[in-house]
Amino acid sequence: MPSNQDAIPETPRVIPPSPASSERRSSSRDYFGPTTRSAARRRQRLGEVTEEEKDGADSDKERSRARSRSPTGSPESTRRRNRRSRPKMPAGKPKAQTNGHTASSNGYLSPLTKPGGGWPDISRSPSPLGLIPLHGRYRSFIHRHEIPRKLLHVSIGFLTLHLYRRGIQPLQITPWLFGALVPIATIDIVRHQSETVNNLYIRCVGALMRETEVSGYNGVIWYLVGAYTVLRFLPKDIGVMSVLLLSWCDTAASTFGRLYGRHTFQLRKGKSFAGTLSAWLVGVITAAAFWGYFVPYIGTFPNDPEGSFMFTGQLNLIPDSFKNLIGWTADTSSAIISGPFALGVMSIVSGLVAAGSEFVDIFGMDDNLTIPILSGIGLWGFLKIFG
């Protein structure tokens, strides 16, 4: 009789990697496919729709199903496993696009927010959409092409020529400009302190505003300041020409830049070659028409101040200051040009000054302020040297 040591051990039971066919038929609805740890973490991260756990299921049974590699399962459970939902966003409001700015969202599509307790932003920036109801309702007419705003812009130039033709001097206009500036600036300051006043203001003049001006200063303020400065401190023809360049060249640059700027290269952010070229061309035409036709046709007035006209139809290509600096004593009368040639040179220079003042950006200041002042200084400096 064999001893216990020589007895043959019982054959161990081998657990198959998948449930038996009988178990599969009886519990097909309870069986789920394999789930690795990385997949579980990925499902949790992406917000997948997880299978509902059976009430009263044994924990060992759940672990055995997780270790199982059998793809067997009902079509319903397979569809449930493959169905995924959209990734869950973090709690709180979604992060808004800031269009290059780092300011937080203010509930609209605007990239700008009003600083808490501080002064509104005065810089130029792309106009967003969503703050002024009229912009959303007439998106192409008011927001995209700014038709009402441009009509007002252009009309200021014709009004300036009308006042010039009637013999009204710049020093007679500046008190009216200052008188309009004070109440407009006061209302603008008050509306930034009161949401009710700001909403009423937007409802009344929203068609003439850019949406960046909702939390910033109205461009009319800078227009009045720029026009007041050049008409008050510069000669008559230079001051009038600066206002005309602001009225027409800026409008041309904005219009043609938006229409054809995408077809040309960018000179800098927000400034295309098409817009700058159109500003130069309109500046050339404006200077040629003003000094070549309008001024000679209207003539002078008895109350014109002394030195009202810096451009008198002649340009000295070799300035007297340069001759005195190098001690030049030779006759340089041949360097003096006049007539159409001088008018052509002056027109080209005026176009360059207009395009340059429209192109540059000085600390993000409004172009309604920078264009007339830079244009006036440029024309005054050129004629001071070569006039």
Image: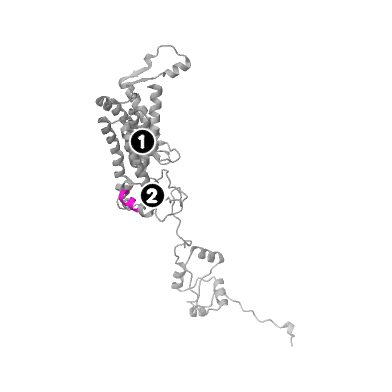
Quadrant of residue 352 within the rendered picture: top left
Which of the image's four quarters has the N terminus? bottom right
Quadrant of residue 185 within the rendered picture: top left
Q: Residue at x 33, y 32 (%)?
A: 171
| Colouring style | one colour
204 within the magenta span: yes
Instruction: Name the one closer to the observer, 181 or 209.
Output: 181
Instruction: Name the one closer to the observer, 342 or 54.
Output: 342
Vertical position of residue 367 compared to residue 239: above or below: below
Vertical position of residue 139 compared to residue 83: above or below: above
Q: Label 2, on which residue? A: 190
Question: Does the rendering let one see residue 176?
Answer: yes
Quadrant of residue 67 within the rendered picture: bottom right
Q: Position of residue 203 (x, y in %)?
A: 31, 52
Alpha-carbon distance for marks 2 and 1?
23 Å
- Crowd rating for badge 2 (residues with CA inside 10 Å; few <14, some 14–19, many 20+): few
Q: Residue furthest bottom?
A: 1
Which of the image's four quarters has the C terminus? top left
Q: Earlier along the polypeptide chain: callout 2 or callout 1?
A: 2
Three-letter residue code for mark 1:
Tyr
Q: Which mark, by number, is residue 228?
A: 1
The answer to whether 44 appears left or right of 141 in the picture is: right
Of helix, strand and loop, which mostly describes the magenta segment?
helix
Vertical position of residue 274 compared to residue 204: above or below: above
For the record, the magenta segment spans 199-205
Q: Residue at x 28, y 31 (%)?
A: 168
